[in-house]
Image (cartoon, rainbow, N blue to C red):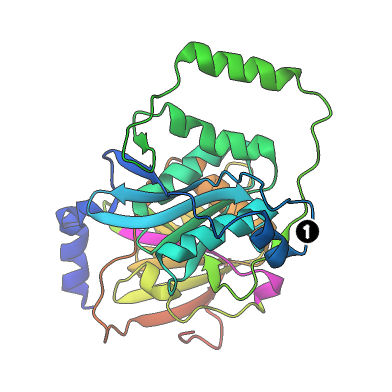
Amino acid sequence: MGEAKRRNRTRNPSTWPRSESFLGTIDLHMLSPTPAINGARIRELTGNDEFPDDTQIILRAFRAEVGQRTFQVGFCLGDGHRFSAIGIAVIERLRIEAPAALLHVVPVKHEDIAWDIVLRHLSTFTGKILLFVFPDSDVYDAGTAEIWYSSRVRQFDPEGNALKQRTPAQRQAIREKKAEILNRPPPPKFYAAGTTTQEEAPWIFRIVTPAGKELRAAIWNGRRDYAHDFPADIIRWVGGDRVAIVQVDGPVGVNLRSSLNLTHRLAQNFDGVVHWARDTETFQSLLNSFIRLDLPSVSPPELPEDWQPEITLLGANGAPRPQDQGP
C-alpha cells in the first residue's frame, strides 16, 4: 500500500464496515427432536452402553438468526477436541441441518468471561455450524444461563413459540439451589467426534490505535510449539495490504496490555495483525486480555479471491524472522 493511501485510510475511519459487529437481537430457534438420535445412536457413536433405547435426550441445538445471517449453533460439555456423549448427539443433530459444513468449535475455559465469549461469537459468526464446549457444568451454566434473560437473545421452541424469560426471582432460586449442591459430579467422559471436520472458530478483534487507525487483530491457538499446521486462510481473518504474523512465546503481562500495545506499534506499518500463540496457555492469556480490555469482536472482512497481501512473520519482540514469508 502506498504511503499516501495508508495516511488517507488512517484519517478516514468511516471506511470501516459497521455491519460486521451485530448489536441487535439474536433469535435462537430450538431444532426439533429427531427420532434417529436416541440412546441407541449414542451407544453406536460412543460405545457408551449407559443409554437405554428409550432415553429421552434433550439437546441444546438451535437455528440462530442474527441480522441477515442464519447458522446452526449448539452447546455441550467438552474440551474442544472431544465431547460428552450428549455433545456427540448435539453435533449429529447440527450436521443434519448442514451435512457438508465445517464444524467451528469454541472452547470456553473460564467461568468469568464465559457469557462474553458466547455473545461475541453469536454476534460475529459467519460460518454454518458453531459449537460452544465447556469443561464442566459450572462454566456451562456461566456461558448459557444468560440466554434465558439477556435482552440480546430471544428463544423459540421448535413450533416457533417464544419462550418466556426467567424472572430475577427464578434466577435467584436457581443460584441458591446450585449453591446447596456439594461434591458436584466430575465431568462426563469425553469422546472424539468421529470423522467430523472441525476447527476452532476465529477470534478477531477491532483495534483503534491512539492515532485513530482501525484494523483487525486475530488470535490463533498455535499449540505444540508452533508445530501445529498454520491455516492457509488465517490471514483472511484480518485483511489489509500488509499483514503481520506475530509468534507469541508466553502469556501476556499482568497489566493485560502488552499484546495490545504491540498491536498499536505494528499498526504503524501493517493493516492487519495475527497473534500466533505458542500454546493453549498463551492463547487463553491473549484471549482473556483482549476481552477484559473490552475490545469489540468482529467478523472476517470480505475480500476478493485474488487478494494477495504482503506478509511478514515476526517474533513477539518485534524482530522480523529471517524466513519472512506467507504461510
Pick the residue in front: 34 or 259. 34
Tell me if residue 178 comes above or below residue 38 in the rendering: above
Horizontal placement of 86 versus 6: left or right? right
Q: On the picture, is 226 further left or further right than 127?
A: right
The residue under label 1 is which amino acid type?
A: Asn
> Which quadrant does the N terminus fall into?
bottom left
Total labels drawn: 1
Q: Nearer the viewer, residue 81 or 18?
A: 81
Q: Residue at x 56, y 81 (%)?
A: 321
Image coordinates of residue 318 in percent, x first then y, are 53, 69
| Residue at the spot 52% in from the left edge and 45% down from the top edge | 60
User: Badge 1, how many Cα within 10 Å: few under 14, some, many 20+?
Assistant: some
Asked whether the viewer can see residue 84, the reply is no
What x and y, as percent, mark residue 86? 64, 51
- Say above or below: 310 vs 28: below
SS assignment at label 1: loop
Residue linked to disc 1:
48
Q: Residue at x 73, y 57 (%)?
A: 190
- Asked whether residue 264 is in view, the answer is yes
Counting from the top left corner in percent of width and height, residue 166 is at 45, 21
Q: Quadrant of residue 302?
A: bottom left
Query: As displayed, is residue 218 above or below residue 287?
Result: below
Q: Which residues are magenta?
A: 215-226
140 or 268: which is nearer to us?
140
Measured from the top left, where is residue 237 in percent x and y?
A: 38, 68
Q: Residue at x 78, y 58 (%)?
A: 48
Q: Is residue 211 magenta?
A: no
Q: In this view of the protein, which residue sits in the foreground, 118 or 96?
A: 96
